[in-house]
Amino acid sequence: MVSGRQTQLIGLLGGMSWESSALYYRLINQAAHDRLGGHHNARSLMYSLDFDELNDLAAKGDWDRVAEVITKAARHLEAGGAAFAMLTAVTAHYVADTVAAAISIPLLHIADPTGKVLQAAGHKRVGLLGTRYTMELGFLAERLQRKFGIELLVPPEDDRTVLHRLIIDELTLGIVRPEAKSLLLRLANGLRARGAEAIMLACTELPLVLAMEDYPISAYDVVKLHAEAAVELALVGAEQQG
C-alpha cells in the first residue's frame, strides 16, 4: 500500500443497470483502497443513463441509437475532466468501438484485462455466460480471438434464451432466486463437457448468483477484472502526470 497517492479521474458510463453501476462503484473503490490503504478511494465521475431506454433500443436492434446515447454521455465525462472512460455493463461493449472513436479520451474495453488474465493462465477455450447479446453478437469473441488467441464457447440457443431472460427480468431488478444458481451450474457443466477450460462471467449481475469458486472449473468475473484494471490505469496515469 502506498499512502498519499491519488488516482486519475475515472469516467464511468452507468445506468445499464443501476445495479451494475453500484457494483462497479464498489469494486473500483475497493481496489483503490486495497492499493492505497488509509481512507483512499478512487476519484471518479459517473454519468448514469436510463436502462429502460437502452434496453428497449437494444431489443429493437437499434444499436446506432444506443451508440449515439452512450457517446453523448461519454462526451460529458470527457468535458468533466475524466482521464478515460469505461462502460459499467458488458453488453454495451457492442458499441464500444463506435464510442471510443467519437471521444478523445481512451475507453477501457472490458475484453482486454480479461484477455490478459486468461492468456496468462494458459486458457485457449473458454465458456461465455452473459446476456443473449453478449453471447450472440460476437464482440467479445472477436476481440479475444484477435488479440489473445482465445476461443469462446456459448450455450445452445434455448439455454441462451433462458439465461438472457433470467438476467433481464430478474437479476437486473435485484431478484435472485435459488433456481438461478442451478441454471448457471448446469450451463457451466455443459460448456465444460464441450471442452471449455474456464468460464467467463460476462455480466455484471451473474456474480450475485454464484461465487467464482463454486463453479466446476476456473471461473473469472470480467467485471472485477475490468474494475481492477481501471484502478491500475488511473494510478499509472496519475504517477506519470507527476
Image (spheres, rainbow, N blue to C red):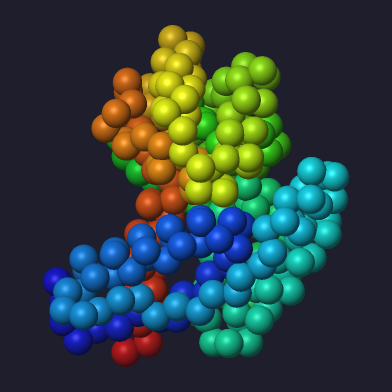
Residue 131 position within the rendered picture, expressed as x and y whole percent measured from the top left: 61, 37
Residue 22 position within the rendered picture, expressed as x and y whole percent measured from the top left: 46, 62
Quadrant of the rendered image containing residue 104: bottom right
Residue under the point 32% across and 21% down: 216
Residue under the point 58% across and 29% down: 163
Q: Is residue 104 left or right of residue 183?
A: right
Q: Can residue 163 be seen in this snapshot?
A: yes
Quadrant of the rendered image containing residue 27: bottom left
Residue 93 position within the rendered picture, expressed as x and y whole percent measured from the top left: 63, 52
Q: Which of the pair 187/75 is nearer the observer?
A: 187
For the C terminus, the image quarter is bottom left
Residue under the point 47% across and 13% down: 190
Residue under the point 61% across and 81% down: 78
Q: Which of the pair 199/179 is nearer the observer?
A: 179
80 in relation to 38, above or below: below
Q: Can residue 196 be seen in this snapshot?
A: no
For the N terminus, the image quarter is bottom left
Q: Is residue 173 left or right of residue 185?
A: right
115 in relation to 154, above or below: below
